[in-house]
Structures are given as C-alpha cells and as structure tokens.
Image (cartoon, grey):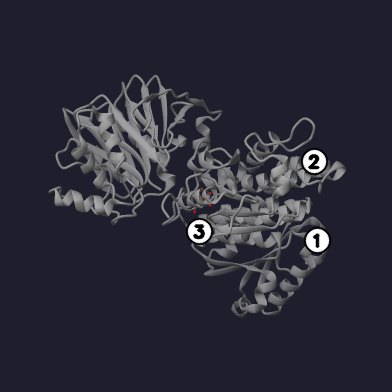
Amino acid sequence: MCGIVGYIGSNRAVPYLLEGLEKLEYRGYDSAGIATVEDGALRILKTKGRVSSLEALIASQHRSLATLGIGHTRWATHGKPNDVNAHPHESANGRFCVVHNGVIENYLPLKADLQAEGYVFRSETDTEVIAHLLEKNFDGDFVSTVRKTTAMLEGAYALCVLCRDFPDRIVCTRWGSPLVLGRCAEGSFIASDISALLAHTNDIFYLDGNEIALVTADGISFFDKNGAPTQKQSRRLELNISAAQKDGYDHFMLKEIMEQPKAVGDTIRGRITKEGKIAFEDFHLTDEEVQRLSRITVVACGSAYHAGAVGKYVIESLARLPVEIDIASEFRYRDPVLDDRTLVVLISQSGETADTLAALRLANERGAKTLCIVNVVSSSIANEGGSVIYTHAGPEIAVATTKAYAAQVSVLYLLAGYLAEKKGLLTGDAFAGYVRDLLALPDLIQKTLDSCRGQMEAFSQMFIPLEHAYFIGRSLDYACAMEASLKLKEISYIHSEAYAAGELKHGTISLIEKGTLVVALCACSAVFPKTLSNIKEVKARGARVLAVATNAENAALSEVDYKVLLPDVNPLFSVSLEVLPMQLLGYYTAKNRGCDIDKPRNLAKSVTVE
Ligand code: G6P
C-alpha cells in the first residue's frame, strides 16, 4: 500500500522516479505523483490512475532537467482517489512538499489547530497536515524541521520531503512504515522496498524507526531522533535485478509459482546443520524455555494465517503443544490471555502488515515470548520480534502470495521438528527421517509443478464461466482448502468457499446442485476415507468433483469426475504439494477470464493500515 521513491544524483531524476514507481506498482495504488525542485521552485505533477497516466501527464509538460525528486503511488485511505488527494502534498507557501506512506492517527486535532491558525487545506488526506507542519516548524535547518514535525505525529509514516530552499538534498524518515536507501555511481536512491533499488544497487541501508536520512548526490548521512549523527552500514543483498523482473513469464504470479522449489530449498537447507539437526540463527528461546512452553498462538493475516493453520496440525502432531491460530485483526481486539509460557508466532511476508505488527506489540507488552516468521529483512515485524526466522523466498511481487506462503509453511515444519526434538518427542531415526523428508521437498515440489501445470491449465476451462466454487477437505486438507479458495477468489473474482468436509452437512450441502463444481482436497492419508464419504455425498446431489490426492489413493477415486495425482510424500508435508495445482488453477482461471492477475482490484500487497 503506497509506494515511495526518491532520487538525487548526476542524472535527470524523472526517468528514475517513473522507473521506481513502476517497480512499486505491485504494492497496490490508485493515484501517482512526483515532485522536483527546478529554478528555485517545487514542481508537482500528480494524477488519479496508473503510473502510465502520470507518465502521459509528464510527457505533456516541459522536460524537467531536475536532478532530484520524489515520487509516490497512493492507495486511498483518507479521501477519494483523485488528483487533489494524490501525493506529493505541498505546504501553503510552496516551501515544502512531502510524500507519505502510513496513517497519521492524530491528523484531525492537528488539522483543527492548523486551520485555527489560518492554514487552508486543499485535500482530504491526513498527509497534508505534515506539509503544513513542516512550514510552521521551519527553523532554517531542513533536518531539524523534519524532526520537530515528526515529533508531533502519531501513527505510522514513511516520509520523503523536498524543500525548495535546499535544492541539493532530500530528507526522509520513517516510523512503522518501511523505507530503504541505496547508493551507486548514479547517485542516491530511496524507496519503500528493495524491488525499486535492485536495478541500481545491492547495497541497501535499512532506515530504523525514527531515524532520519539526509540524502545528497554524494552520500547519505543518518541522524537519530534527537538529531545526533549515527553510523550506519549498508547490507549487501545476494539478489539480482531478475528477482524484480518477470524473466520471460507473462506474470509475476506464474514466475513465483515456478520459483517454489528454490524458495523452499533456500528456506530449509541453511537450517539443517552438518550433524543433521535443525538450527535457527535468531531463535532466542533457551532449551529450558522451550520445555516450559504451555502453548503456541499463531497470529497472521490472509495467506499467512492459512500457513499458520498448516503449522497448527504439524506442531500439535509432533511437538504435542496446543496451538491456536488467530487472525491478527481479531487477536489484537480480543484481550487475549498471554503469559511467559505462551509462544506467539507472528507470520508475515512483508513484515509490515499493520494488524500483525499491532498483535506483535500486544504480545510483547503482555510478556509472551514472540517469534516472527518474516520474508522482508529488517521489516518492522522482524525488528520488533523476540526471535526471527526469515523465509528465504526472495522478493514477492504478485499480490497473491505463492512462494512466500510455501516458505512460511516450510519454516513451520522446521519449527515443529525443532520443538519436538527439544522435547524429546522426535529423536533418533524418526528425527533423521523427518529431516530427510524435509530436504526432499524441493524436488517433490518441482516434480508436482512439472506434472500438473498443463493439467491445471486445461481444468481451468471449467472454472471460467463459474459464479461459485467450493473447496472441501479435512485436517491438513482443510488448511489447504482455505488457501486454495482464497487464491481462486482473489484473482479471478469467482466467489468460492472453503469448507471443512465434515461440516458440509451442517449447511453448505444445501447449496450443492446438479453441476456444482466441488474441489475435494484429499492428500491427507489419515482422513482420506472420511473425505471420500463426503465426496460421495456431494456426488449423490449432482456435484462435479475435482479431487486432489496422492498417487497412493488413485484406485479409490474411481467415482470422481476429474483428478490430480501428487507424488507420495510424508503426510505431514502434503499441503506443500497439494497447494501447487490450486495456485495454478487460480492463476489460469484468472488469466482466461482476462483479470489483472498481479494487481487484483482493491487489493494491496502490503497492508499497512488496519
Ligand atoms: C495481503 C496480501 C496477502 C497476504 C496478506 C498478509 O492481503 O495480498 O497475500 O497473505 O496481506 O500479508 P503479510 O505481508 O503479513 O504476509
């Protein structure tokens, strides 16, 4: 949600700003804008719609020679998506302009005070208060003015500020919303995330909360919230620009689906020691604390929550700890019972999801142990968690997650094995076998993708005209059904429901009629016979059934209309294979319905507001 870019260097800024904004389009937005400083004045161009509309607007104006500028893609929260509410926002006297990602929670009282002092507001946004506060707080020193201004703000913000009095610098800062910086021969770059920087540099500075960066063409200086200079090292990322490009695929989503063997392999391999143990770099619970744990609460949103549902089954089965799973926006407002024997596991690809971050802060406040499973290095959730396990999925651009979900599930398998071993419940050959099966997963994922891609493209034809579809399963298959249903609905806009197969008879079966399409997930061998009975129930009412099961169950599936067979796999890991045809089904259905697959309507990749 919202993307920020900034450039200052020896070249014209506008092409860099547009290139960066295009890279951030995936975050979700509905308007875009840029600002530069030219001939001692700020020049702002902004418009409702796509970056391509902004590009057309810029092309219709005189060519900018400015060598510094800032840009923004806005996902509307306060005020409609229109030209006026688009960022950048300018102070009344035209001295400052600002782009902002986040929400200023106290903007109404600040706005009322500013209006009482005569400041006139043009937009409906919370951001405009920042522009006027910069003007009001101006003391001749750019960094100090920004510092005084942010001290008055409550909420979350990443800010990039231009001042016409200082045409050789940009000042940026953040609290709760992300911002990264990079340097190379062309100059200095600022962005909401690394995908907008990778074309220019792999050496990334992660701005800490409340830290301020003074960015010039020649370098970047950092200051703490009191204005004292700080030393900061860049981090070298082992990624190249192809991580943020489609690399010949039609869509990022398909590229990311096909990258899952690598994402899972990279996530698992580094955690298996030479001695065959499971180890994590940043896991701060002692063996004694692990023994003392009385339960685990997994908290997350969207697909990360669905990954947590897989983790529940696997951890309970192996480590014999009760696991509850909770949606972050529910958890944070339900006064949860937590203590120092509870491990709260927060799962987030972006590491910036507002509700998950708030849930983490609540768990920390209440004295629970916290462990964050995060994909984006140095994100807010990673920084504030008691322990962190990174998923090494690489940048994920498509809004609908695939490889990050696969990596999250893999971390939960590792965690389950780790806890079970520490508790003496999985030892010797059984533990070694578990680790062997884990290491075999990337190859099985590859094999499954190879065998089912064409098949799912063909099956998607049946889904194209549908208005409704149903996904059923029990146990781990139910966890997978939730993710399968979300994948289909979020990108193809077909209504779908995931149902615990045993619960069908309590309501949903009344919706089954002749021709209804039911996807029956039945890769989980322990409950296969039970799910088979549910398949028979819906078949008896005229449903067409597409079943997904392992090769071992082939013979028992003689009555289903269509089937997808998976390689035989450790039953605890079945979701890692079963979800693959479901991701492909969502993808090809959306593609054949002509949907905007990587940027589905109304959705954002990183949900930084609650
Ligand atoms: C959005 C994304 C989903 C994601 C969810 C949680 O809804 O579209 O793909 O699962 O947010 O995001 P997180 O970054 O916390 O995993």
Residue type indicated by callout 3: Glu
- Residue 108 falls left or right of residue 399: left
Residue 553 shows which numbered tag? 1
Q: Residue furthest left?
A: 118
Question: Mark 3 CB in 8 Å range of ligand 1?
Answer: yes
Which residue is drawn at the image coordinates 56% and 41% (left, top)?
Answer: 375
The picture quadrant where one finds residue 132 is: top left
Cα distance between the residues tagged 2 and 3: 35 Å
Sequence order check: which comes first, mark 1 or mark 2?
2
The nearer-to-camera label among 2 and 3 is 2
Which of these two is toward me, 223 or 562?
A: 223
Q: Which of the 4 quarters of the picture holds residue 225?
A: top left
Q: Residue at x 22, y 42 (%)?
A: 133
The answer, for residue 55, to whether it is visible in the render is: no
Q: Position of residue 165 (x, y in %)?
A: 19, 28
Question: Which residue is tagged 3?
Answer: 490
**Residue 4 rendering spot, x and y as whole percentages:** 36, 39
Residue denoted by label 2? 436
Determine the CA span between mark 1 and mark 2: 23 Å
Of the 4 image quadrants, the one containing the C terminus is bottom left
